[in-house]
Amino acid sequence: MRAIRFETTGGPDVLQAIEIETPTPGPGQILVRHQAIGINFIETYQRTGLYPVKLPAIPGGEAAGVVEALGEGVTRFKVGDRVGTTNASGAYAEASLVRADRAVAIPDGISVEVAAAVLLKGMTTEAFVRRTYPVKAGETVLVHAAVGGVGQIMTQWLKAIGATVIATVGSEAKAEKARALGADHVILYREQDVAAEVRRITNGAGVPVAYDSVGKDTFEGTLASLARRGLFVSFGNASGPVPPFAPARLAAGGSLYLTRPTLVDYIVTAEELDESAGLVFDMVASGKIEIEIGQTFALGDARKAHEALESRATVGASLLIP
Ligand SMILES: NC(=O)c1ccc[n+]([C@@H]2O[C@H](COP(=O)([O-])OP(=O)(O)OC[C@H]3O[C@@H](n4cnc5c(N)ncnc54)[C@H](OP(=O)(O)O)[C@@H]3O)[C@@H](O)[C@H]2O)c1
């Protein structure tokens, strides 16, 4: 089968198409034949070495397709079931082995493309807006990179539960899209002072929670946008990692909290996976969240996909099609 692999860390050109043997599932595993592969920013961190992985590596943590073979003891699925996989590795391939309890059934009415586009990004949203900080109707929340993959889902989810969303985006075209998604206020964070805008919008109060996946470039502005005892949810580094900072800065900012959550700690058991994925699929099926698959690439063009993601040229979710 065809797969994308990198042997050394570096730019997008380290991603090479290779042929490998289709693996056989071991106990508790399933072999999934991929029909769509979700691209997530984390794969660029792994490729550059920001998040170290064992080399050589086949990147990819999310795919959707059909169960082709079952390992010993698997009862959760049967051959032919449509499933989505997350928190796995090796998804940039025509097929992959996954632990059965790391895969979830795709409900009727949801396409494999939408499943691959929404599952990981949607569960990230579910975990962070319901569990890291349970956002309540009427609260005003800051969401950075609001028309990216996670950002679009988070913006719509927050609107669906009655929150007011202050969205940041990197261009005027993206601002228009953010408004169409329901964002109440849009800040062009490459030009405007985020904290000053947030204070103006909130009559000086600041926001009780801010979702920041941009990292280095937005850190100061996010910190300065929080209300007293507000929570900084730092969940990514699209612009680079946040540099070390002194905890005393949280006191100076108004007894703030900062958390650096990762999805793997919120989806530990099969029950948590089913519950979170179920909530995500319900949001899509009910029309509360529309999934924009902004870009699709052939599996062999994975490097082009990474170039597009890292150059901020994408909107919504991106897929690789095997
Ligand atoms: N902690 C977790 O468990 C978890 C899980 C899933 C995702 N994440 C994080 O969530 C973020 C979004 O992931 P995604 O896959 O949906 O990606 P994405 O949002 O589709 O792409 C990243 C976006 O970040 C913005 N950005 C700002 N500065 C950037 C820079 N210097 N270079 C590149 N992009 C920049 C861009 O939007 P603008 O042009 O509008 O600025 C870009 O489109 C990532 O940081 C990812 O690591 C974390």
Image (cartoon, helix red, strand yellow):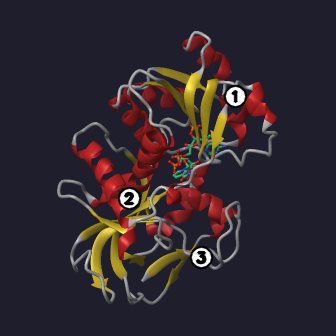
- Front tag of 3 and 1: 1
Rate crowding at label 2 as few (under 14), some (14 to 19) or many (20 or more) other CA atoms within 10 Å.
few
In the picture shown, does residue 204 fall above or below 44? Answer: above
Residue bearing mark 2: 272
Q: Is residue 200 visible?
A: yes
In the picture shown, does residue 132 fall above or below 231? Answer: below
For image coordinates 80% across by 45% down, the residue present is: 244
Residue 303, by quadrant, is bottom right
Q: Is residue 192 visible?
A: no
Which amino acid does the dot numbered 1 rest on? Ser
Label 3 to label 1: alpha-carbon separation: 42 Å
Name the secondary structure under disc 1. Answer: loop
In the picture shown, does residue 237 fall above or below 82? Answer: above
* Quadrant of the rendering where the C terminus is positioned: bottom left
Residue bearing mark 3: 57
Residue 282 in picture, x, y percent from top left: 25, 46
Residue bearing mark 1: 255
Left or right? Give the position of 20 relative to 45. left
Q: Nearer the viewer, residue 313 or 69?
A: 69
Left or right? Give the position of 198 relative to 112. right
Which amino acid does the dot numbered 2 rest on? Glu
Residue 147 in picture, x, y percent from top left: 47, 37
- Front tag of 3 and 2: 2
Dot 3 or dot 2: first in sequence order is 3
Q: Is mark 2 within 8 Å of ligand 1?
A: no
